[in-house]
Image (cartoon, rainbow, N blue to C red):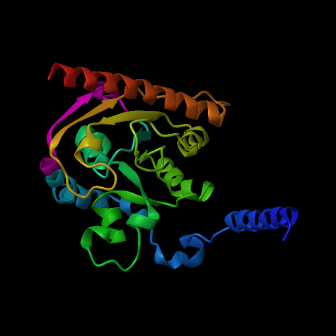
Amino acid sequence: MTGNDSGTGADVSATKIVSVRKKKVPTLYEQDESRYAGPHPWQIQPWAKALRRGLRWHAYTRWSNEAFTSVTVAGAEHLETLDEPCLFIGNHQSHLDTLLVMAALPEHVRRNLYLGAAQDRWYVRGRKKLVLQPWYQSLALGNFPILRGGGKRALAYAAWLLQQGQHVFLFPEGTRATSSALGEFKHGVSILALENGVPVVPMYLDGLKQLRPKGQRDVVKGAAHATILPPVRFAAGTAVAEATQRLYDLMSAVHHDRAGLDAAVRRAA
């Protein structure tokens, strides 16, 4: 084989490799969507809300007591006059995030709050463990399933909740952070806010990555802090990308402030 022949062979192999990599691999949803459950619209009924409040200790409070030595909240005054459905957002550090959200928010918000949860993790049919039952997720935890990469379809139930006068909580990063940086925000929150004319309340969650980072099962008990920013209202006609950038900038500013504060505390210690 000559040098030219060898080069041609390499080019053909490279082309095949690229072709294989670009081939669309079916997602779990496309292979068998029947494996996944929800959402459960009955979760907003008065009886479901009453049961959820009764189950809160079992679903949230006892775990918060085990994970947190203290919970501090800044900006709670921004919620005192909240009288309309809102989109709450938070940075995603840990599986403990929703514990802090529920501990930080006042009762008049919590009783009408529903949290987006990855459908392929929390809404899988047939699991035996109680807390992993889809009905338990919807009833006790107030969760609803989010279809990863589902586009407009993934937002439909969240939009319905807002239209029913309920609050919705989403993580615009889409997944837990693995670095010290704030992850890129997806546009879903902005689309929901603009199409439904509701304000967005950013919440910056701090300290949880140290307690249980992604990939770690054990919890190191420690302090947690939540910063609640003023509601953000977008003018009609605001571009989706512009709205997303505004939310990211607001959260990023708190992220850098809190990182600087933590560094100063460590230096003082």
| Image coords of residue 56 (percent x, y) | 20, 55
Write down the quadrant of residue 1 in the picture. Answer: bottom right
Picture residue at 53% right of the left edge, 59% below the top: 148
Q: Nearer the viewer, residue 7 or 216?
A: 7
Residue at 41% x, 72% y is 124
- Residue 109 in view (yes/no): yes
Look at the image and tell me in which quarter the C terminus lies.
Answer: top left
Q: Residue at x 54, y 28 (%)?
A: 246
Assess whether residue 95 is covered by the magenta stretch. no
Residue ranking furthest to the front: 2
Q: Position of residue 267 (x, y in %)?
A: 21, 21
Q: Is residue 80 above or below residue 149?
A: above
Magenta range is 64-83
Question: Residue 100: where, in percent of width, then height?
Answer: 26, 43
Q: Is residue 39 among the parts visible in the rendering? A: no
The residue closer to the viewer here, 189 or 83, is 189
**135 on left or right of 242:** left
